[in-house]
Amino acid sequence: MPASVVILGGGIIGLSCAFEAASRGKRVTVVEPGAFGGQASGAAAGMLAPYTENPEQPDPFFHLCLDSLRRYPDWIRRVEEASGKRVELLHTGSLTVAMHEADVLPLQTRLAWQREHGAEAELVAGERLRQLEPLLSKQAAAALYCPGESHVHAPKLVVALAEACRKLGVRLLGGAGTIDLTDPGSAGGVAVTTGAYGVVEGDSLLICAGAWACQYAETLGFPVPVHPIRGQICSFDVPFGGVRHMVFSSQAYWVGKMDGALVCGASEDVAGYDASVTERGIGRLVRWGPRLFPFLEGRQPSLSWAGLRPATRDGWPLIGPVPGRPEIVMAAGHYRNGILLSPATAALAADILEGKASAARSAAFAPDRFAQTAGIASL
Ligand code: GLY
């Protein structure tokens, strides 16, 4: 019998881990309390931007992000082949815009180290910037152009992943309601009790519960340091190609999708598990838009929505075995980069389940790394 894995959570991370584990021959069941991709994954703008999202230094988190970006074309090819569905992966590149001269220096600093790590980036201004992004404000001082960054249509990716999983024989138990970790008794392995499907058992458990992962802390006897940070986001009706790149500024970003939605995000606020939008959150994005894109003056978004990002104390995900429970692995806390990190996380989680993960990578993202630091500090 091949080994069986129960995956708790059907967002982008849970479905990606399921696809990878099933591709490697595991028997996989995904239990999802609500709808697949119904939380942060469905709310995401789908930016695959390791250079832009990591302005500071080339640390292990940056390397995980970069590794994941490089996996994306092949990953999408596999998902499309297995599912028979198209996923919108667009290699548009990105522009990080400085509106003031004073903001150009940090971009130059960033450019220097990122070029050493494969970014074929350049600082652009004047006519060159205008050619790249004709609708951008003429007030922009300069921009960091990073041609290697891409974006994906996150809701389409979730649908395709779910279909790919189904075709590989993954049991997808959506609408499972309450999910409790249960003592598997003398049989060993793992068991979860679901509201809708009763007890689901397996050899190992992968917890991919995003901002809800912390709810299992007490049962696991382990402080799971994940908390929700709300991201509010909206979209304007703008024909595809109007805004050509992913455009980032200090206050917001804009990403043009093929269906004519110019997605603009995103707030970062603490609102517990409240995923509603507020006038304040969306209003700030609407007011900021015309500064970069004068054509947005007076325009209102056609849609607005919110998602709960699973944040950790250092902004890095928790990927690794639960202390003292090698049969339970966590893959949660991806904060702003869940879509980008999904292929690398799926590969790492599958390696961990097979006992093949590299020690360095495992240590960097160990779920108990904060407890380890606290221990060292108190010596
Ligand atoms: N990665 C963009 C965001 O979280 O808003």
Image (cartoon, grey):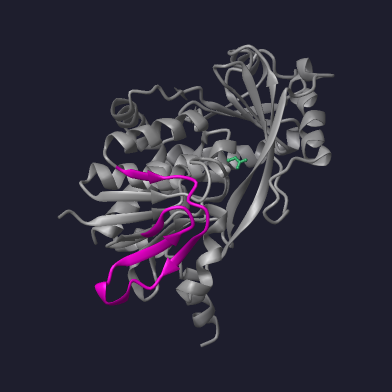
Q: Nearer the viewer, residue 65 or 310?
A: 310
Span colored in magenta: 170-199
Residue 220 in magenta stretch: no
Residue 72: x %, y % from top left: 38, 34
Question: Where does ligand 1 appear, by image quarter?
Answer: top right
Question: How many marks do you count on the picture?
Answer: 0
Residue 320 showing in the rendered view? no
Residue drawn at (63%, 16%) of the image: 133
Q: Quadrant of residue 235?
A: top right
Q: Is residue 231 left or right of residue 53?
A: right
Residue drawn at (54%, 78%) of the image: 374
Q: Is residue 337 left or right of residue 71?
A: right
In the image, residue 152 above or below residue 203: above
> Dividing the image into 4 quarters, which one contains the N terminus?
bottom left
Residue drawn at (50%, 75%) of the image: 371
Q: Quadrant of residue 65?
A: top left
In the image, residue 54 above or below residue 195: above
In the image, residue 137 above or below residue 156: above
Residue 196 in magenta stretch: yes
Residue 265: x %, y % from top left: 67, 35
Residue 196 showing in the rendered view? yes
